[in-house]
Amino acid sequence: MCQEEKKCKECKECTGCPECKIDDSGVFQQDCEKCQNCKDCENCKDCEKQNRQEKCNQCKGNMHDRSDFKVIKTRLEEGNKRFRENTPIHPNQSRKRRECTAKKGQKPFAIVLSCADSRVPPELVFDTGIADLFVVRVAGNIANISSIASIEFAVAALGCRYILVLGHEGCGAVKAAMSKDPAPSDNLSQLVGHILPAVNACKCSCKAENDDYYTIAEGEKEPLKKVTIENVFHSANELTRCSEIIRNAVNSGNVKIQPAYYNLGKGKVDFDIKSEC
Ligand SMILES: [Zn+2]
């Protein structure tokens, strides 16, 4: 039976759940009192035994909230703040977290569509751990069949409701799309083709001659950033245009797509970006 002093500070109902052991920063401090071995886990065994699964998940939702877009965004912002200020807590990376999620499955709180660039690892940039983020990485963070299908899976099968489309400073794929030189292979040409709509949109606003565009982009950082951000919005639009699952989820308010831009050197993710092209 729940004892008053042991009631979960979040759900106020169940005791012994992992949530009771979470401190203000959202980190598990110790094992669950009841099952003793579910530290960092998604589902407390004992709570589950006592048919408290729902309540535990309710508690869990306060930390791993997958329903409130603001809470998810705040969690990402706070993780990024820890990362860039060099104070990461590396949550959810314990052996028990690994074992528990292997057994119980994954419930990532956000999807991230980001570039394959080795300087942009979302799990590190947002100071997250195992089963926290469903990360889809492809050069230029483009929305192609593979990335869209992966995101559809996360939405439809895993219940993810928040999609972050993350562009970044100095993106080689965007540079390649802005280059007058042809791509060195058909595969790369196809990939770059996904970014061309953003390039073309910005060309108009930049008023540059086609051949001069990359020169301008190299000489000044702004055009590259502009196209990169435009490409983020283009990818976000493509997710809804090309996927009925994502489109329906967004239109019904069940899923939010958030554009963002990562500054390599500063380590900061800017959520407040706007399309200028
Ligand atoms: Zn890139």
Image (cartoon, rainbow, N blue to C red):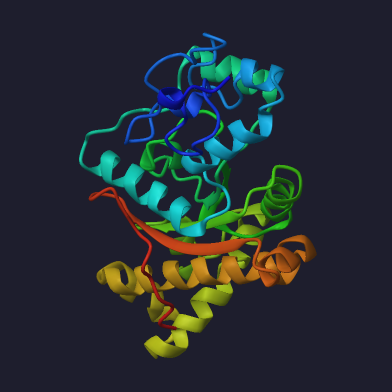
Check the image and report above or below for 220 versus 8. Answer: below
Where residue 22 sits, quadrant-wise, is: top left
Left or right for 42, reference 223: right
- Check the image and name the residue furthest to the left: 85
Q: Position of residue 105 (x, y in %)?
A: 68, 28
Name the quarter where the N terminus is drawn.
top right
Name the quarter where the C terminus is drawn.
bottom left
Residue drawn where x is 57% and y is 56% of the image: 163
Check the image and report above or below for 77 versus 124. Answer: below
Left or right for 93, reference 37: left
- Which one is in front, 51 or 66? 51
Residue drawn where x is 54% and y is 41% of the image: 61
Answer yes or no: is residue 131 visible: yes
- Check the image and name the residue furthest to the right: 244
Residue drawn where x is 27% and y is 46% of the image: 81
Residue drawn where x is 45% and y is 38% of the image: 10
